[in-house]
Image (cartoon, rainbow, N blue to C red):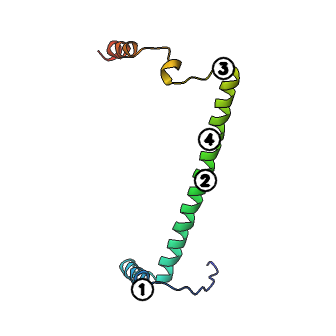
């Protein structure tokens, strides 16, 4: 069994009521509800930190690619400048494939 550490916290009356109600519905102790809430909260924080790190990594990559394109003169102002096809070509290809 996991070693438990006693903590004393102050709750608002509404929080106390919510914990009591949920513990009753699930037939578990109030302490179990609080431990589960802490675990969920910490998991959410961990997820947000990972998402933020991933975003920052992607943003750095995009900035590096943009800077590289500017150095070589390969940047495009719009998607249309980069496209080698026309809309009509795409639709005719689709019609040929699916009838």
- The residue tagged 1 is 13
- What quarter of the picture does the C terminus occupy? top left
Disc 4 or 3, which lies upstream in sequence? 4
Task: Compute the Cα span from label 4 to label 3.
Answer: 21 Å
Under tag 2, what secondary structure? helix
Give 52 or 1, whichever is nearer the viewer. 52
Give 32 or 46, whichever is nearer the viewer. 46
- The residue tagged 2 is 50
Give 58 or 68, whichever is nearer the viewer. 68
Q: Is residue 18 left or right of residue 65?
A: left
Task: Compute the Cα span from label 4 to label 2.
Answer: 14 Å
Nearest to the eye among marks 4 and 2: give it.
4
Give 17 or 56, whichever is nearer the viewer. 56
Q: For label 3, count other residues whose C-alpha is less than 10 Å away and answer few (under 14), some (14-19) or many (20+).
A: few
Task: Reply above or below: 6 against 52.
Answer: below
Task: Reply above or below: 29 against 88.
Answer: below
Residue drawn at the location 59% of the way across and 46% of the way down = 55
Residue drawn at the location 39% of the way across and 12% of the way down = 89
Disc 4 or 2, which lies upstream in sequence? 2
- The residue tagged 4 is 59
Task: Compute the Cα span from label 1 to label 4.
Answer: 44 Å
Task: Compute the Cα span from label 3 to label 1.
Answer: 64 Å
Q: Residue 54's spot in the image, x, y percent?
A: 61, 47
Q: Residue 28's spot in the image, x, y percent?
A: 44, 80
Q: Residue 44's spot in the image, x, y percent?
A: 54, 61
Q: For label 2, count other residues whose C-alpha is less than 10 Å away and answer few (under 14), some (14-19) or many (20+).
A: few
Q: Which mark is residue 93?
A: none
Q: Which mark is residue 73?
A: 3
Disc 2 or 3, which lies upstream in sequence? 2
Q: Residue 26's spot in the image, x, y percent?
A: 39, 77
Task: Reply above or below: 34 against 57.
Answer: below
């Amino acid at each position: 069994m996991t070693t438990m550490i006693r903590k004393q916290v102050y709750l608002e009356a509404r929080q106390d009521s919510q914990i009591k109600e949920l513990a009753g519905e699930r037939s578990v102790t109030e302490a179990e509800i609080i431990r589960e809430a802490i675990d969920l909260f910490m998991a959410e924080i961990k997820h947000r930190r990972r998402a933020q790190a991933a975003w920052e990594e992607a943003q750095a990559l995009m900035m590096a690619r943009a800077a590289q394109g500017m150095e070589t003169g390969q940047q495009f102002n719009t998607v249309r400048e980069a496209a080698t096809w026309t809309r009509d070509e795409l639709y005719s290809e689709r019609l040929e494939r699916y009838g």
